């Protein structure tokens, strides 16, 4: 994998995970490479793509199930970020990477997403309006010490309301995700409940 300069200058405090050989082989293959986005990659991909489609993934759901000690939090006050956890289903976006810049683009995604050994990139089948595609998705590693499990909406709201990291606040991360899902016609009831609870917390603290 080649070195990749972050688009916004942000550098994680954690090293980039080593890329397994089967994943690295995708960079030079002749087959199309699709990546499934379910969180910030939807509204801030920071990479070029040849095609984007709405997609439905079965077997995993979007969840604030990972503590973040740099990206959207700090070691002293961890925040939360989204992961794909087992069970249910998830609507997101699948991106087809540009074949003429496949290796460079894939390296950029890997450097951004795959740090701290909290995700495993896994081959998944995604349904799209134009038919099914095989994509790569960042699935949460439940054996990671940063795995938060299934937090209640109340607990998630309290963490996100006060978290600040190298790429911004937990509140902004949640709001950007929810607004983008709404623009796509997707309502994620759990994320909306967390957002509503954060608004209540702000009012109770005199913030609104």
Image: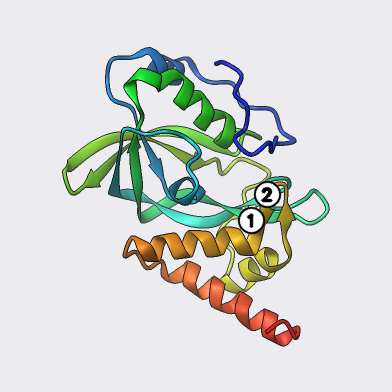
Front residue (pair 77, 108): 108
Residue that carries the numbered disc 1 in the rendered image: 80
Residue at image coords 66%, 35%: 116
Disc 2 to disc 1: CB gap under 8 Å: yes
Classify residue 173 as left or right of residue 52: right
User: Residue 50 location, x and y as percent?
Assistant: 31, 32
How is the structure coloured here?
rainbow
Of the 4 image quadrants, the one containing the N terminus is top right
Q: Determine the secondary structure under disc 2.
A: strand
42 versus 133 height, above or below: below
Classify residue 205 as left or right of residue 36: right
User: Residue 67 location, x and y as percent?
Assistant: 66, 51
Give neighbour class at mark 2: few <14, some 14-19, many 20+ (Cα, 10 Å). many
User: Residue 185 location, x and y as percent?
Assistant: 31, 65
73 versus 118 height, above or below: below
Classify residue 192 as left or right of residue 31: right
Of the 4 image quadrants, the one containing the C terminus is bottom right
Pointer 2 or 1: first along the chain: 2
Q: Residue furthest left?
A: 130
Residue at image coords 33%, 14%: 29
Give neighbour class at mark 1: few <14, some 14-19, many 20+ (Cα, 10 Å). many
**Which quadrant holds residue 187?**
bottom left
Front residue (pair 92, 147): 92
User: Residue 70 location, x and y as percent?
Assistant: 72, 45
Q: Determine the secondary structure under disc 1.
A: strand
56 versus 170 height, above or below: above
Residue at image coords 44%, 21%: 23
Residue that carries the numbered disc 2 in the rendered image: 68
Residue 34 numbered tag: none
Measure the C-alpha gap from mark 2 to mark 1.
5 Å
């Amino acid at each position: 994998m080649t070195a990749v300069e972050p688009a916004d200058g942000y550098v994680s405090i954690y090293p980039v995970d080593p890329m397994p050989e089967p994943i690295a082989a995708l960079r030079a293959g002749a087959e199309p490479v699709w990546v499934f986005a379910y969180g910030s990659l939807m509204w801030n991909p920071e990479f070029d793509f040849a095609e984007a489609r709405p997609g439905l993934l079965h077997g995993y759901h979007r969840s604030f199930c990972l503590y973040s000690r740099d990206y959207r939090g700090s070691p002293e006050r961890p925040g939360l970020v989204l992961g794909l956890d087992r069970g249910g289903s998830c609507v997101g976006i699948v991106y087809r990477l540009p074949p003429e810049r496949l290796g460079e683009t894939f390296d950029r995604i890997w450097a951004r997403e795959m740090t701290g050994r909290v995700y495993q990139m896994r081959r998944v089948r995604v349904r799209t309006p134009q038919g099914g595609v095989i994509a790569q998705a960042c699935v949460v590693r439940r054996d990671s010490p940063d795995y938060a499990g299934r937090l209640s909406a109340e607990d998630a709201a309290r963490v996100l309301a006060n978290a600040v990291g190298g790429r911004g606040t937990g509140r902004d991360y949640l709001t950007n995700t929810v607004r983008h899902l709404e623009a796509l016609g997707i309502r994620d009831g759990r994320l909306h409940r967390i957002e509503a609870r954060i608004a209540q917390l702000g009012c109770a603290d005199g913030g609104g």
